[in-house]
Image (cartoon, rainbow, N blue to C red):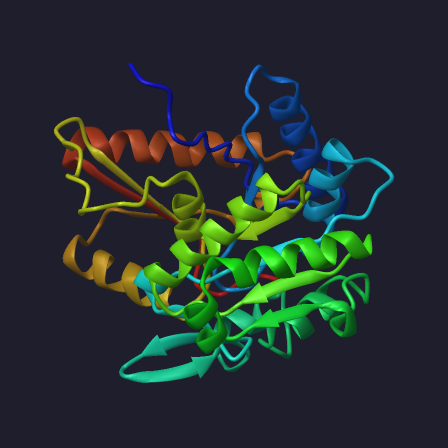
Amino acid sequence: MRDPAAIYVLTNSRAEEPTAAYRTVFEAATAARDSSMSSPIVLRGDSTLRAHLLEEYLGVRDALAPGRELPMLLVPALPAAGRITVDGVHLIEQDGKRIPLHDTPYARDPQFAYADARIVQWAEDRSGGYFARSASVEIGLNELRTRGSAVVADALLRIADNGSASVCVPDAESQEDLTIIADGLRGAWRSGAEVVVRCAPAFAGAIARNTATRYATPSSARHGLLVVCGSYVPRSTRQLARLVEAHPGVLIEVDVLALAGQAPAVEILRVARAAQDLLAATGLAIVATPRDRPS
């Protein structure tokens, strides 16, 4: 078996409080640093700008370069899902329109709300001013496509030489744009730049050169299918409603307050047993949070 192009360490740090998220990412980055591999470490984050941006950056920085400031390359574009960055603003394509993310339900997330999808402004706001917009660099689509990967490498080397915590935000409208950015990042690495990368799934694949070329074949559900939904955004709610409508009688709603309380084991056991019974009886169990999110 050949070595993998990339290894993904799933931490779900977004579900944690900021201090815990820092610790989780720091420990994961430290473990990767101390392994026998010499591969770069990349923060694979969310394409809708919901993140412990500063804490997770510090977790990687403190593991790799304690006591120093490193620039950060921010590439949240996920073109296959309609999430793109144009003129420095993160957008979502829906019904033929491009909508700034700050005008969508994602920006009203109870934990990660934001007022501006201009990524350099979002980074400043989310970090409490740590990543100053005035020190950050944006790379437009025309410049990216005209100058190619060199414009990304030059920008990263320039802000790395400054020794400040600044961000680099290249536009990205397509997978081809992400490939150019990845080539520029590799060029900066070859020239000695130390950069923290935070990106959506598509750019992680572009860095590792293992992007998907086709849809995956679904695995067999002959032993039953368990569906778990915790997201509260309207799209997830619509998807869940369609699923429950097509398969009535298999929804198990969890008691969120019990799970978040001091003794969640009873609720976990209840849900697990109910799911087990449904899987045995029908082959399908849907475990989901209620659609009204308790404060």
Relative side of 73 to 164, left or right: left
Relative side of 135 to 29, left or right: right
Viewer-proximal residue among 45 and 168: 168
Q: Quadrant of the C terminus?
A: bottom right
Instruction: State the residue at coordinates (16%, 33%).
Output: 221
Instruction: State the residue at coordinates (19%, 61%).
Output: 245
**Which residue reaches farthest bottom?**
97
Viewer-proximal residue among 140 and 225: 140
Res 50 → quadrant: bottom right
As displayed, is residue 1 above or below residue 222? Answer: above
Viewer-proximal residue among 235 and 166: 166
**Which residue reaches farthest right?**
67
Q: x, y percentage for residue 153?
A: 58, 55
Relative side of 218 to 212, left or right: left
As displayed, is residue 108 above or below residue 285? Answer: below
Instruction: State the residue at coordinates (67%, 53%).
Output: 157
Res 228 → quadrant: top left
Q: x, y percentage for residue 194?
A: 68, 43
Res 49 → quadrant: bottom right
